Amino acid sequence: MAVAELILPNKTLADNQAVGMEHWPQDAFAAMQRLMNSHFHTRDRRKVARYQYNVIGKLVLDNIANIAATVFTRDVNAWHSSFITQDELTIGTPAILQLRCRKNWKITAACRVRRCQDIGDGWYESYVEFSQPQVRLG
């Protein structure tokens, strides 16, 4: 999926037309909708803009062999990706983020978990910081 539009504070999923989320499980879609319409989304502390980027990915945790979390991405830039997941992640954990994209390419990026907060109903909002800039995402 190509990088879509800039997420603006106080926009809803309907405003952003849920780009790329048509194949998500209903509970993941509902969790993202709650997040985007909540106070978590309106407190934007970002120094660099991120772009809406809704794909299903995998976060492989470096410190636990063969353990991966399914992630549903919210937005990205060359340095970060935010997502929701049903796995509680430990802040500071090194990991590998794998995203499958259109145009038959896949992003595999070393990263570190920088945030994981409970958003209810068994879902967590998290973001990772990439070890190296991911120019295809920026």
Image (cartoon, grey):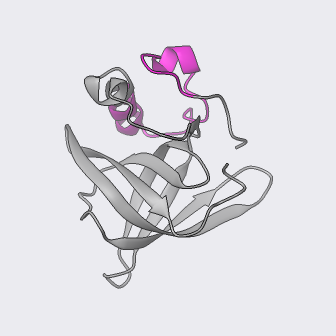
Q: Quadrant of residue 108 in the image? A: bottom right
The N terminus is located in which quarter?
Answer: top right
Q: Quadrant of residue 88 in the image? A: bottom left
| 129 and 97: which is toward the camera | 129
In the rendered picture of this protein, how many numbered marks are placed on residues? 0
Image coordinates for residue 125, horizontal then vertical, percent: 32, 44
User: What residue span does the magenta drawing correspond to?
Assistant: 7-33
| 90 and 55: which is toward the camera | 90
Image coordinates for residue 114, horizontal then vertical, percent: 34, 58
Q: Is residue 135 left or right of residue 16?
A: right
Q: Is residue 112 left or right of residue 120?
A: right
- Point out the residue furthest to the bottom here: 65
Residue 21 magenta-highlighted: yes
Image coordinates for residue 19, horizontal then vertical, percent: 60, 30
Q: Is residue 75 left or right of residue 135?
A: left
Residue 18 magenta-highlighted: yes
Image coordinates for residue 4, horizontal then vertical, percent: 67, 33
Q: Write the residue at 39% across / 26% down.
A: 36
For residue 8, above or below residue 27: above
Q: Write the residue at 35% across / 23% down.
A: 42
Q: In this view, does 99 lie to the left or right of 80?
A: right
| 72 and 132: which is toward the camera | 132
For residue 137, above or below residue 23: below
For residue 22, above or below residue 66: above
For residue 83, above or below residue 21: below
Q: Quadrant of residue 46 in the image? A: top left
